[in-house]
Image: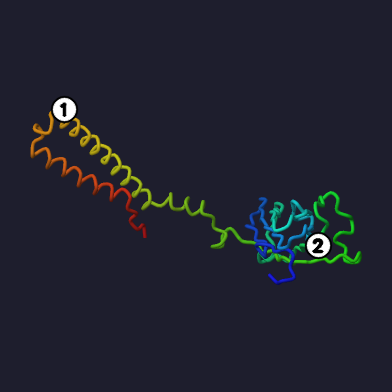
Amino acid sequence: MTATQIISVSPDELKFHFELEKQTYCDLKVLNNTQNHVAFKVKTTSPKKYFVRPNTGVVQPWDSCIIRVTLQAQREYPPDMQCKDKFLLQSTVVNPNTDVDELPPDTFNKESGNSIEELKLRVSYISPTSPEGSSEDNSEQKLDSSPALQQLKEEKDAAARQTRQLQQELDMLKRQRNRTGSTGFSFTSAIFVGFLGVLLGFVLKLLFSSPSTE
């Protein structure tokens, strides 16, 4: 961002996860870097292809807003998944407390003498088969269907049941000790309780460990 920019946009490139017959969107964050009210307008080379809301607005000093750009559902893939579409974000300083509905028609017209700042944004499509386009949900589905993970789940379930059983036995021994008093608690019972505690710790360690599935 240069010192002359009154607004900044993030990200500086619109990336859409492209799938046939599905809408997808990309959010842009527009930040006002000045102490003035700034009006903006979004233009694109393919207006029938994208839905932009809001496409015009006013950002208060040092404030920001979100612009959602929606790619309409497409019936065919673009050649080589390359996109030549471009977006242009125009901005200009307006009077304080100016509402978007009150903007003059020539607000973003350079010929009217207004100082207009322009930011150009490129568009790229991400294929679902690409590493960047692979979602976490798809990864989880693949992991869930793997035999190694299924076996791990079964082992953890069994360990959990055994842990609950050991915990119940420990609780029962503690109740018996409380009823009989400390004098009635034999040395053998103490050893047994200690053994159960060690076994319980081992089972818990097995339960929360994550062995490699490679």
Question: In front: 71, or 93?
Answer: 93
Q: Marks 1 and 2, how far apart in space?
A: 82 Å
Residue kind at label 1, given as amino acid type: Arg
Please identify the residue farthest to the top as the structure is shown. Answer: 179
Instruction: Residue 147: tell me if it is visible.
Output: yes
Q: Is residue 161 above or below residue 109?
A: above
Question: In front: 187, or 161?
Answer: 187
The numbered disc on residue 90 is none
Q: Residue at x 74, y 60 (%)?
A: 35
Judging from the image, what secondary structure is the residue with disc 1 in? helix
Q: Position of residue 163 (x, y in %)?
A: 27, 41
Q: Residue at x 16, y 30 (%)?
A: 176
Question: In front: 138, or 76?
Answer: 138
Q: Residue at x 12, y 42 (%)?
A: 191
Is the C terminus in the top left, top right, bottom left or bottom right quadrant?
bottom left
The numbered disc on residue 92 is 2
Quarter assignment of residue 8? bottom right
Nearer-N-terminus badge (1/2): 2
Question: In front: 121, or 138?
Answer: 121
